[in-house]
Image (tube, rainbow, N blue to C red):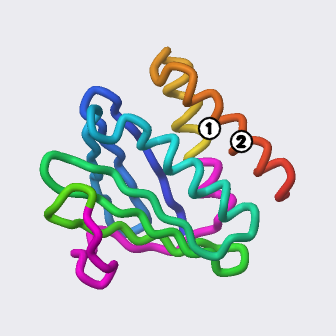
Amino acid sequence: MKLTLSYDRRYGQMTIADDSRETVVFHSTVLSYHALDDLAEAVVKLLQMVTRATCAWAVEPGEHRWILERRGEEVQITILWFRDSFSNQLDEQGEEEFSAVCKLRRFAVQVKNVLQTEIDAGSGGAYLPSAYGKLAAALRSEG
């Protein structure tokens, strides 16, 4: 399955699309300043053979929770919506916004490319190059 990511820093918005659908996920650039870093960290964990990783993107109000589950060489990506920011609700209580399975490596490269684009644009301060470096190293050691 083809999966693509694109990010618009002006609105803190990630567009994620597969062969059949497209979803836009937002984060508050104030509440979730490190949203891209958090997503990259979750992907690094998967590349290091952790089977499940999550990250949350807070908005005002609400939260998008990314659930990433490794299944061999693939990753199940599920994005849930919760009405409250910083929600402690169980995953089952969220509203599914997006769900797809794709190659883990492809998803990791897509996240890395988003980070690179943001670094090239001069955004993210020091944290994005750090996240990029960790993800690039995990991809090298994984494959």
Let me know if residue 142 is in the magenta part.
no
Quadrant of the rendering where the C terminus is positioned? bottom right
Residue at image point 14% right, 64% down: 83
Residue at the bottom extreme of this rendering: 92
- Is 19 rendered above or below residue 133? below
Residue at image point 77% right, 50% down: 138
- Is 82 rendered above or below residue 96? above
Pointer 2 residue? 134
Q: Secondary structure at mark 1?
A: helix
Let me know if residue 108 is in the magenta part.
yes
In the rendering, which numbered label is found on residue 131? 1
The answer to the question of whether label 1 and label 2 lie on touching residues, with beta carbons closer than 8 A, is yes
Res. 70 image quadrant: bottom right
Estimate how packed mark 1 is, as few (under 14), some (14 to 19) or many (20 or more) residues with alpha carbons within 10 Å: many
What is the three-letter code of the residue carrying label 2?
Lys
Q: Is residue 70 left or right of residue 11?
A: right
Res. 112 image quadrant: top right
Residue at image point 18% right, 56% down: 62
Residue at the front extreme of this rendering: 88
Res. 47 image quadrant: bottom right
Question: Magenta span covers which residues?
Answer: 87-110
How far apart are the two marked residues, 1 and 2, measured between alpha carbons? 5 Å
What is the three-letter code of the residue carrying label 1?
Ala
Residue nearest the viewer, comparing 23 with 94: 94
Q: Is residue 33 left or right of residue 31?
A: right
